[in-house]
Image (tube, grey):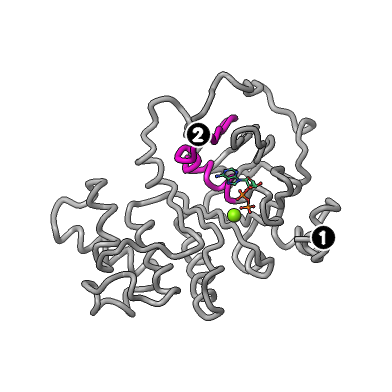
Amino acid sequence: MRQPENIPIPASFSRDQLQTVGDIFVENPRIQCRNVDVYYGEKHAIQDVNLDVGRNEVIALIGPSGCGKSTFLRCLNRMNDTILGCRVNGEIKLDGLDIYADGLDVVTLRAQVGMVFQKPNPFPKSIFENVAYGPRIHGLASDKFELEEIVEKSLRRAGLWDEIKDYLRHPGTGLSGGQQQRLCIARTIAVNPEVILMDEPCSALDPIATAKIEQLIDDLREDYTIAIVTHSMQQAARVSQRTAYFHLGKVIEVGDTALIFTNPRHQLTEDYITGRFG
Ligand SMILES: Nc1ncnc2c1ncn2[C@@H]1O[C@H](COP(=O)(O)OP(=O)(O)O)[C@@H](O)[C@H]1O
Ligand SMILES: [Mg+2]
């Protein structure tokens, strides 16, 4: 759906042009977004967003409902391509490569940049099949034993193995909400992603299940880059190192999570985190 003829990317990029307060750049970026705009038909949902995400970093995307957090997240693995009438302009690079380049294989991209949604959405298949599906279609296992190994490793990494190892043939949909969400994380991990996108992954979960997912996010940072949308500022503070505050489609402020929450520089950020709106 992208229309590459729109909005050329400036060759040189100056900090003076930025409308974002704080440092959009990181030293060791995995993702680099420049001049990203998203339209749904006439609606300009994301406006000139410039943002880097570092390796082994959890970045929290916060802001009032409708400000564009999910839309922005979906740009990062081209999920917006699937929405009729949605256009993405600008430049997004993963490890230095343009993910909107002509001929890029989006199926591979979506394995590299996996996504976990608000509502756990296991396939109506067994626990084993939920995790084995991705490695099978991507040809990651040469035989049955290797596939079993990948499934076990992924379930262990998602902190679920010990709870379900005797029930691998049971349906994934029979698990509790928190277990289902960890199953979805295992499914994402199974295809060797570099980045995991999470869109309010705990909003359907109870506090104990939420705490487990938050712990898991912290563990996963060792191996992956994570971008998480959350409406809980406590959660953002607990799991992320950097936070970006979105407002009406723009990134208003970005920076070190502890600083954003204790010492916001932009009035809009301050209004949001002190609960004046949202
Ligand atoms: N599929 C869509 N079609 C049209 N407009 C959409 C669509 N998805 C989101 N929007 C609009 O884009 C804006 C940003 O939405 P969204 O990214 O869902 O915000 P958030 O995740 O921050 O709540 C909102 O105004 C919303 O109504
Ligand atoms: Mg959303």
Q: Residue at x 81, y 65 (%)?
A: 274
Q: Is residue 133 left or right of residue 235?
A: left
Say which residue label 2 marks. Answer: 96
Is 131 covered by the magenta stretch? no
Q: Position of residue 22 (x, y in %)?
A: 76, 46
Q: Hey, what amino acid is under mark 2? A: Gly
Q: Position of residue 105 (x, y in %)?
A: 36, 34
- Where is ligand 2, by quadrant? bottom right
Q: Is mark 1 within 8 Å of ligand 1?
A: no
Query: For residue 47, what is the image quadrant?
Result: top right
Residue in front for this viewpoint, 268 or 59: 268
Count of labels shown?
A: 2
The magenta region covers 70-92
For residue 73, above or below residue 102: below
Residue in front for this viewpoint, 26 or 39: 39
Q: Residue at x 65, y 40 (%)?
A: 46
Q: Hey, what amino acid is under mark 1? A: Asn
Q: Residue at x 64, y 42 (%)?
A: 51
Q: Is mark 2 within 8 Å of ligand 1?
A: no
> Which residue is situated farthest in the right direction here?
267
Q: Is residue 243 left or right of residue 18?
A: left
Q: Secondary structure at mark 1?
A: loop
Q: Position of residue 241 (x, y in %)?
A: 63, 59
In this view of the protein, can residue 49 be seen by the observer?
A: no
> Which residue is situated farthest in the top direction here?
5
Is 74 covered by the magenta stretch? yes
Rendered image: mark on residue 263:
1
Q: Is residue 240 left or right of residue 2?
A: right
